[in-house]
Amino acid sequence: MTSAAASADLLELAHGIAVRAGAFALEARGHGVSVAATKSTPTDVVTAVDRDTEALIRSLILDARPHDGIVGEEDAAHIGTSGLDWIVDPIDGTVNFLYGIPSWAVSIGVAERGGADAASGPGGIEGTTLAGVVLNPVSGELSEASLGGGASSAGRRLAVNDGVPLHQALVATGFGYATDVRRRQAEVLLGVLPEVRDIRRIGSAALDLAALAAGRLDAYYERGLNAWDHAAGGLIAREAGAVVTGPRGGRENSELLVAAAPGLHAELVALLRRAGVDA
């Protein structure tokens, strides 16, 4: 396992790269943005800025660590030989970015392949996440964590809200783009909403997880996520004290991610099952 010092070094590098990439994307947004392509559906969009920002991130990573792998949303995986993979979402919340809604993020995580924490199932992290950074370039808020080193933002230690009962919990979620998926997610939401304080839909999994770590949310769940959506944010939430799991208590993946403080997590998982999330 990579040492704590090495994880801290990786975090420092990820921090610097995220700041440069965020500044690049924010400046590009100021010049205007349009849809360059679509992915799973006509509403699942990619902009040229997504692609250009990921290209910048990849070049900065490989300049510093040429033997590492890179898994990104917008380009094919770069296979490395070091045993470390960078998991990159250049703009998490592309629809927000497109519309000028100030809730989008640069998300960069670093994972060590293999080990006891290797995820199973699609959309999971194939290894142990060692460092992660989530930056909102519009607000300038940057949240970060290293494995065993805690989570912080602007030098302030992050900690999830503890002792919140389910009926008082502010819970975030998100929705897929395919019509049948959205319909099923809406059905689950009908079972969740009456049992909690309220629901928030921010539009960026990375920002949801960072907000949970900062105590601005009490819990978060979502189906259909990819590794780059939650690699950095999942570590930040864990290091802030959250329990982050997937289906049936395993590692989070595209089937399900549930994150909350320990007591609330168990209550939310039970509620989600009653609402039919496993169907």
Image (tube, rainbow, N blue to C red):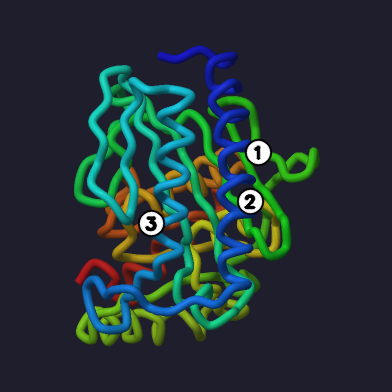
- Looking at the rendered structure, the secondary structure element under dot 2 is helix
Residue 32: quarter of image = bottom right
Q: Earlier in the sequence, mark 2 or mark 3?
A: 2
Amino acid type, callout 2: Ala
Amino acid type, callout 3: Leu
Where is 166 relative to 177, above or below?
above
**Mark 1, residues whose alpha carbon is within 10 Å: few (<14), some, or many (≥20)?**
many
Q: Looking at the picture, how far across and down is residue 68, in whole percent? A: 35, 25
- Find residue 257 and name its label: 3
Residue 141: quarter of image = bottom right
- The answer to the question of whether label 1 and label 2 lie on touching residues, with beta carbons closer than 8 A, is yes
- Find residue 151 and name its label: 1
Q: Looking at the picture, how far across and down is residue 230, in whole percent? A: 43, 51
Say whether residue 120 is visible. yes
Where is 29 relative to 257, above or below?
below
Q: Looking at the picture, how far across and down is residue 184, in whole percent? A: 26, 82
Q: Looking at the picture, how far across and down is residue 91, in whole percent? A: 48, 60
Say whether residue 264 is visible. no
**Mark 3, residues whose alpha carbon is within 10 Å: few (<14), some, or many (≥20)?**
many
- Looking at the rendered structure, the secondary structure element under dot 1 is strand
Where is 72 relative to 132, above or below?
below
Depth order, front residue of 267/12? 12
**Residue bearing the label numbered 2:** 213
Q: Earlier in the sequence, mark 1 or mark 3?
A: 1
- Residue at 29% across, 79% down: 177
Left or right: 39 as drawn, with respect to 3? left
